[in-house]
Image (spheres, rainbow, N blue to C red):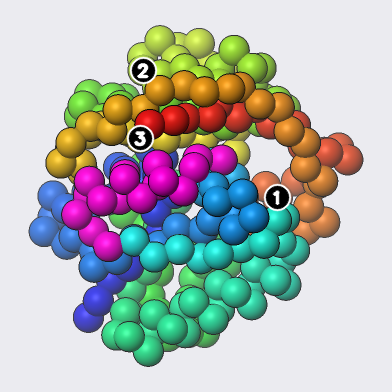
Amino acid sequence: MKTYFNWSGGKDSSIALFRMMEAGNTPELLLTSVNAMHNRVSMHGVRRELLEIQTMETGIPLETLELPEQPDMNTYNTLMGEKMNSLKQRGFSKAVFGDIFLEDLKKYREEKLAAAGIEAVFPIWKEDTRSLAEYFINEGFKAIIVCVNERWLDSSFCGRELDHSFLNDLPPDVDPCGENGEFHSYVYAGPVFRNAIPVKKGALVHRTYPVPSGNDADNCYTTPVKEQYGFYFQDLLL
């Protein structure tokens, strides 16, 4: 049985992948959703070349799901369904995710994968997020915050290192792992990589996006609160 891993390039993915590697269950493939128009990781805003060097350092092959700009759920489901069916035909029977506690997202993934004959696996499901964030740091991972949702965090959090200081500065209503979509990260060093990635900071950019009309399974936003979401993105360069 072959396993693929849904890789975002952030801390939750890195922790879940590390757990698999430690257990001797390294996946055969990493799958990442990419905004094909901008050549960046969906929602995280990380350049494709940084994704590629990151996955190269894991030693695991990468495939991408190429998405249009701001796809609606029907488009997303169609494209993801085609990809899952292709993977199933190539012998993949398990799909791994770094999700922690969003029940509706877990159910969505399980139902869609079951329809394709693939089992969904969640290595860090229901673990305490503060403990996971501290575990990430203590195990030697290093990451930069590349995206923050201004509903929860201001621009000063974008571009920071994900360290104990960052965790201590988070407002009490922000999850330490950003599981509600408060922030996203790019991991550039740690035990899942052969070498650290020498990234440097580029511009800090503010962008707004329309509120999704229903569950947005790719971005994990389930409760629209205003007409637009505002985000800060920290561009990273090699």
Residue picked out by circle 2: 163
The residue carrying pointer 1 sits among few (fewer than 14), some (14 to 19) or many (20 or more) residues within 10 Å by Cα, namely some
Residue 220 versus residue 115 in the image, above or below: above
Amino acid type at mark 2: Asp
Q: Residue furthest right?
A: 227
Mark closer to the chain start, 2 or 1? 2
Q: Which mark is residue 203?
A: none
Q: Is residue 46 magenta?
A: yes
Q: Does 151 appear in magenta? A: no
Mark 1 vs 3, N-terminal side: 3
Q: Is residue 14 left or right of residue 237?
A: left
Q: Amino acid at mark 1?
A: Thr
Query: What separation in Å lies between label 3 and label 2 (alpha carbons)?
Result: 12 Å
Location of residue 122 in the rendering, given as x and y in whole percent from the top left corner: 37, 58
Residue at image position (70%, 71%) is: 75
Residue 145 x %, y %: 48, 26
Per the image, the residue denoted by label 3 is: 187
CB-based contact (under 8 Å), mark 3 and mark 2: no
Q: Does 103 sit above or below residue 203? A: below
Q: Main secondary structure of the magenta part?
A: helix
Query: Which residues lie in the magenta part?
Result: 45-61
Res 66 seen here? yes
Q: Which residue is located at x 59 percent, y 54 percent?
A: 35
| Earlier residue among tags 3 and 2 | 2
Would you say 202 lies left or right of 154 here? Answer: left
Q: Quadrant of the N terminus?
A: bottom left
